Image (cartoon, rainbow, N blue to C red):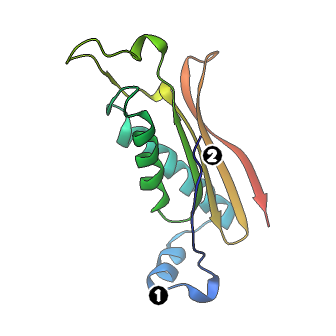
């Protein structure tokens, strides 16, 4: 699984007027905002990319494209995406032989950092639920 990390940090003293105005709109704690942001990123991964044509030949490129698109969003510290294609979808037999990305094929881990709060959110297909579950796996204060 690739892991892309943000290469810059914005400290409180470097917040732009626009960033301060946006922060003032949130009537919640930094922890709650980090959780909110994590949910947005998980929703983006699922709803923006499900349905994308995928094959064994473009899986890595699609993983990188998803990671890079999430990395440009606010507060993302790192993101890792793995697409799991079943063995019966690996061989292209003719022109029309490809599959569309489904939620159950995506494993994703996103870390969000707002000031001293870091939230890790994940998306995994949970067999017992028969569902691609998005969940918070860790919250830490630093």
Label 1: few (<14), some or many (≥20) within 10 Å?
few
The residue under label 1 is 17
Residue 26's x, y, as percent? 54, 69
Label 2: few (<14), some or many (≥20) within 10 Å?
many
Residue 88's x, y, as percent? 43, 10
- Nearest-to-viewer mark from 2 and 1: 2
The residue depicted at 21 percent of the width and 17 percent of the height is 96
In the rendered structure, the answer to whether residue 47 lies left or right of residue 87 reads left
Task: Tell me, yes or no, whether the two marked residues, 2 and 1, touch with CB atoms within 8 Å.
Answer: no
Q: Quadrant of the C terminus?
A: bottom right
Residue 65 or residue 28, whichever sits in front? 65
The residue depicted at 41 percent of the width and 17 percent of the height is 90
Residue 129's x, y, as percent? 60, 18
The residue under label 2 is 121
Is residue 29 visible in the rendered structure shown here? no
Q: Residue furthest left?
A: 95
Residue 44 or residue 55, whichever sits in front? 55
Q: Secondary structure at mark 2?
A: strand
Quadrant of the rendered image containing residue 2: top right
């Amino acid at each position: 699984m690739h892991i892309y990390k943000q290469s810059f940090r914005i400290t409180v003293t470097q917040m732009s007027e626009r960033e301060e105005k946006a922060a003032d709109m949130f009537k919640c704690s930094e922890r709650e905002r980090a959780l909110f942001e994590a949910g947005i990123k998980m929703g983006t991964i699922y709803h923006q990319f499900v349905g994308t044509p995928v094959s064994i030949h473009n899986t890595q490129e699609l993983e990188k494209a998803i990671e890079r698109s999430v990395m440009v969003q606010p507060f993302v510290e790192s993101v890792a995406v793995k697409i799991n294609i079943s063995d019966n979808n690996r061989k292209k037999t003719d022109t029309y032989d490809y599959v569309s990305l489904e939620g159950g094929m995506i494993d994703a881990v996103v870390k969000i950092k707002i000031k001293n709060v870091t939230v890790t959110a994940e998306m995994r297909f949970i067999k017992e639920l028969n569902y691609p579950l998005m969940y918070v796996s860790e919250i830490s204060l630093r």
